[in-house]
Image (cartoon, rainbow, N blue to C red):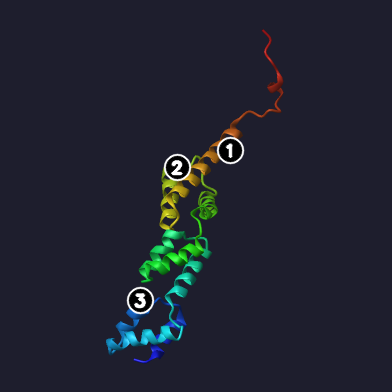
Amino acid sequence: MTSKTGLRALARRAHSAAELRQKLQRRALDPAGVEPLLEDLAARGWLDDRRFALGYARYRAGTGRYGRARVARELHRRGVAQELMEEALAEVFPEEEQQRPLVRQRIARRLQGKKRPYSQRLLRSVYAGLLRAGFPSAIIRDELFAQARQALADDLEAAEPDSGSPDSGKEESV
C-alpha cells in the first residue's frame, strides 16, 4: 500500500487518524504497513486530529442545528481523543448559555403554524428533537416553558374584551 491510498481518502474529506486507520486496515494487503503510513501523513501535516476536531466542530455548530453534546458524540464516534475533543468544543461552544438563541429559534420554527394550545405530544416531540440535536435539557425546558407562557398570554390578551367598545366606559348606577 502506498501513501496514495491515504492521500486519496484525505482528498475526499477530512478524517481523524482513527477513521483513516480503520479505512486503510480494511483495504490493506499488509496491515502492518498502516501505522507507518499514518505516522508519515501526520509528520507531513496532512493528518491532524486537533485540526480535524476543530474543523468538524465548527462546521457542525455553524449550521445552528447541533449543540455541544451532539458534536461531542460525533467526534467520539470518529475516534478523536478526549482532550482534543474538549479543546475543540471549548473553542466552538464557549458557554452553554450561548446556545439559548439557537434553541429559541428552533422551537419557534417547529411551533410556527401549529394550533394552540400546543399539545403535550408536540411539545414532547420538540423537546426530544432538540435533545437529540445535543442542546442542554435545562435550556430546552426553559425555552419551551417560555414559549408556552407567551402563547398563553397572547391567547388571553386576544380573548379580553375590546376596551374601545361602547359598553366598556359605562358604570352601573345603584
Q: Give the distance between the C-alpha atoms of the residues marked 1 and 2, in whole angstroms.
A: 17 Å
Q: Nearer the viewer, mark 1 or mark 2?
A: 1
| Residue nearest the observer in this picture, 114 or 4 | 4
- Image quadrant in which the C terminus is located: top right
Q: Amino acid at mark 3?
A: Ala
Pointer 2 local density, CA inside 10 Å: few below 14, some 14–19, many at least 20: few
Q: CA distance from mark 3 to mark 2?
A: 45 Å
Relative depth, front residue between 150 and 34 = 34
Q: Is residue 112 visible?
A: yes
Residue type for callout 1: Asp
Q: How many residues crowd around disc 3 within 10 Å: few (fewer than 14), some, or many (20 or more)?
A: some
**Residue at the image position 45 percent from the left and 66 percent from the top:** 87
Residue nearer the viewer, 154 or 31: 31
| For residue 168, side relative to residue 110 (left or right) | right
The amino acid beneath tag 2 is: Ser
Q: Earlier in the sequence, mark 1 or mark 2?
A: 2
Which residue is at a point 51% across and 50% down the rendered structure image? 107
Q: Determine which residue is flagged by label 1.
A: 154
- Residue 103: x percent and y percent? 51, 53
Query: Tag 1: Cα neighbours inside 10 Å, few (<14), some, or many (≥20)?
Result: few
Position of 157 with respect to 100 (left or right) is right
Q: Position of residue 128 (x, y in %)?
A: 41, 52
* Residue 140 x %, y %: 46, 49
Q: Earlier in the sequence, mark 3 or mark 2?
A: 3
Q: Residue 18 got which mark?
A: 3
Tell me the tag on residue 119.
2
The residue nearer to you, when weighing 112 against 15, is 15
Residue 153 location, x and y as percent?
56, 36
